[in-house]
Amino acid sequence: MDTSNISLTGSLSKGWMARALDVAFDREYYFDLQKRLEIDRRCNGYARGELADLNIFYAESNLGEYAYFSDDQILVGGIQPNMILGMLIGAGFTPNDSMDADISMTPLKGKDPDELPAPESLIEHELIKRFDEQIRKVRSEGRLTPVPPFFWDISGRATIHGTLTTAQKFLGESIFIDLMTAPEKVVKVMDWITESFIVLVKHFSEVGELPLTAVHIGECSGCMVNPDMFAQFVVPHASRIAEAIGPLRFHSCGASTHLLECMKTISSLAALDLGGDTSVAKVREVFGEDFPVDIAPMPADFSADSPDPILNWAKHVIAENHGGPLRILYHLEPDYKLEIVRVLSEYIKGL
């Protein structure tokens, strides 16, 4: 069995870094460039020192590319995509010193979707202008490379949340009922989200002088619908985004075996990023042995009493992979055990 195409890459969570370095991810961290740079460099210095035996760096889960990262970059507006969009329609920003930030929930609940601002007008919002100014300031100083909002490195791969995932955050859990009982209203919101993401990504690509090369869509809520609903409500929006921006890396974090046939119909689909309970055998059956696949181990296995569960998972996945390009990704959370991470790392290296 060919295992030469298998690798392991990790990223460090804010929760892990807050505990390890006693740093605080407060509001200033997200909006003060100098503080952002200092903390990010401390986090990555820790990765290169304390965790030098691991292929790991500090980044948002699944968004940054290790190969395109360096200390000469600075994240401008490094806030998760759907939170930036939510802030543009009135959601409050809620940082947390020891974990990921969030926004006030359901900013569109009870609102008329016909009253949403034109996507093109969003670039005139005060928040967007603030990020624009910061990007231009960094570029004018010439010491660092700015990574604009909706990007996490200099690869040119834009990163956004999926349209359904964002709609759920903006409208609430009732969206899944509304998709069946009042789809017209939800589709209007989803259309607006899709077009807004496209406008904002293209805007920051231009301002940041970072040519678009690809797009990552994190459709975390996609696994919560059946194939028919996925085909009706997810595929068209993902396809529009990929057609407008570039080759698509599509993320679905939950069990998604039942959706693989539908995923194959998404335009410009170039890679998959899947949860560990999705069948890799089915992925290879549907997409072939040369299709790039990223997959995350089951989180509970990293905090188990022994490394046996994660090793058994890895052996099963690798056997089903049939030698195709496979990257195992994990996001180091505070309750994970480093000894289990290291056992997995040594196992993959040993292949």
Image: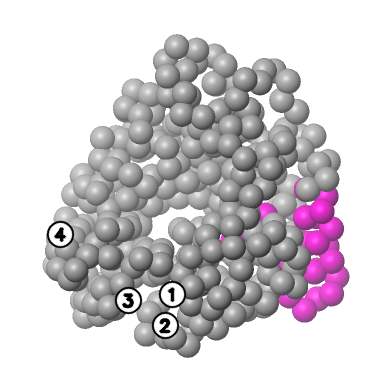
Mark found first going from the N terminus, 1 or 3: 1
Label 2 amino acid?
Leu
39 magenta-colored: no
Where is residue 151 drawn, in percent x and y? 61, 57
- Front: mark 4 or 3: 3
Q: For the residue labelled by badge 2, is the local secondary structure a helix, a strand or a loop?
A: loop
In which image quadrant can residue 179 be found? Answer: top left
Residue 214 placement (x, y as % from top left): 54, 52
* Residue matched to label 1: 56
What residue is rendered at 33% in x and 44% in y?
Answer: 254
- Comparing 229 with 112, the one in front is 112
Whole-percent x, y for residue 292 in the image = 35, 56
Mark with earlier residue (4, 1): 1
Of labels 4 and 2, earlier in sequence is 2
Q: Do the residues labelled 4 and 1 touch (CB within 8 Å)?
A: no
Disc 3: which residue? 338
Q: What stretch is highlighted in magenta?
A: 128-152
Q: How far apart are marks 1 and 3 (CA)?
A: 12 Å
CA distance for labels 4 and 3: 22 Å
- Identified by mark 4, the residue type is His
Pair 3/2: label in front: 3
In the structure shown, which secondary structural element does the residue marked by tag 3 occupy?
A: helix
Tags 4 and 2 in contact by the CB under 8 Å rule? Answer: no
**Callout 1: helix, strand or loop?**
strand
Query: What is the distance, in whole Å, between disc 4 and disc 1 at their CAs?
Result: 23 Å
C-alpha separation, residue under disc 3 versus residue under disc 2 = 9 Å
Mark found first going from the N terminus, 1 or 2: 2
Q: Which mark is residue 174?
A: none
* Amino acid on which the number 3 mark rests in the picture: Leu
Residue bearing the label numbered 2:
51
Q: Separation of disc 4 and disc 2 at Cα?
A: 27 Å
231 displayed left or right of 189: left
